[in-house]
Amino acid sequence: KRTRTDAEISITLPHQIQSYLDKEIQTTSLKVQCIINSGANVVISQKGINASAQNNLSKAGIISIRRVKENDMLWLKKATNAQVIRDLSSDVILPEYLGYAERVYEKFVGGDKMVFVEGCKNPKAVTILLRAGSKRLLDEYHRSVLDVIAVIRDFIVKPSIVGGGGSAEMLIATNVRKKASSISGREQIVLQKFAAALEEIPLTIARNAGMNTIDTLAQLRSKQKQHGFSTSKNKIVRWIGIDAIGRKVAEIYSQRVIEPSIVKEQIIKTAVEVTTLLIRVDDVLMAKPAMYTHTHSNGTQHSHAGGEGKHDHHFDRLGKQQRPAHHFY
């Protein structure tokens, strides 16, 4: 493999080999001494570390970790507040280049050796270690954790919450229907359909919980009208939604079923934009799929986008009927 630096060494006499090795040891020793003088007790390198350098670092009580991935180096920098030093040619490593961690140790996890860096001061990056009995469960845990992190992130961006369980959609639908009743034009039908679309969210939750959707919708509208949100400052806000565990219509906010308001805003905004885009479409042109699947003599089958004409294949040459299409490309 070609190195990044083009360099050549010309050795004509045997003793020059030893001189070259001595110079290498001297250079390595100077860099190791530079690390020792800095006061560091852990060295983490993206590249390899010379065996003699590792030995000298070990004698000085310094832990050396090599061949760490570049992205892991970035997270370590953010976690420990250390600086990545790309060249040790200078004789001094400044104290502000060093990071901090209470513990650095190696541990076996599931048969693999892992290095843990713990107790960092004000870390800007952390690692969440997920473990499960199977790959499928681990993937589920991974997706769930990502969802939780996204929700927390949204709440930090806009620290505002609304009731969950479809109560926010039901609240909006009720107010949209009130607005529709005050309009006499065609817009009234549009607003009523929009309210009905919003009501599908709590009804979907009810359907998944095994509840009767007709009875549920009637209860939602009744309780929302009696106890729901009012613009009057003298009334308390109540979020009427679906209690999926109890399989009933209830006040959701008191049961701590909540969602970030920014998520609700984005969902409704995206749904309206997509619907508006689809309504503006006048016509749709459908591409003609491949009509036939042909089979080769080795038994492989696939389709081609070639119009309505049959493709010559192995079965035709044998005088047998062509197999109908089963998939398209």
Image (cartoon, grey):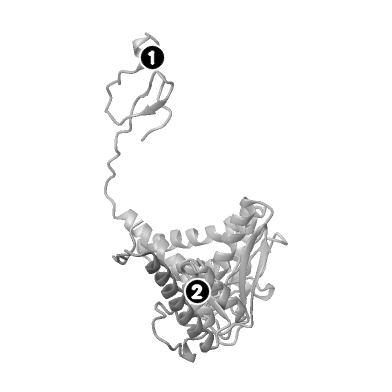
Q: Residue furthest top?
A: 319
Q: CA distance from mark 1 to mark 2?
A: 59 Å
Nearer mark to the viewer, of 1 and 2: 2
* Crowd around label 2: few <14 · some 14–19 · many ≥20 (10 Å): some
Report x, y in % for residue 4. 32, 65
Q: Quadrant of the N terminus?
A: bottom left
**In-front residue for pair 20/245:** 20
Q: Tell me if I can see residue 209 in this picture.
A: yes
Report x, y in % for residue 210. 67, 52
Q: Is residue 126 above or below residue 185?
A: below
Report x, y in % for residue 48. 48, 67
Q: Residue furthest right?
A: 246
Q: Is residue 70 above or below residue 112?
A: below
**In-front residue for pair 130/304:** 130
Residue at the image position 62 percent from the left and 53 percent from the top: 207
Nearer-N-terminus badge (1/2): 2
Could you tell me which secondary element the residue under label 1 belongs to? helix
**In-front residue for pair 175/239:** 239
Amino acid at pointer 2: Trp
Could you tell me which secondary element the residue under label 2 belongs to? helix
Q: Tell me the tag on residue 315.
A: 1
Residue that mark 2 sits on? 75
Q: Quadrant of residue 26?
A: bottom left
Residue at the image position 65 percent from the left and 56 percent from the top: 215
Residue at the image position 66 percent from the left and 51 percent from the top: 134
In this picture, residue 292 sits left or right of residue 239: left
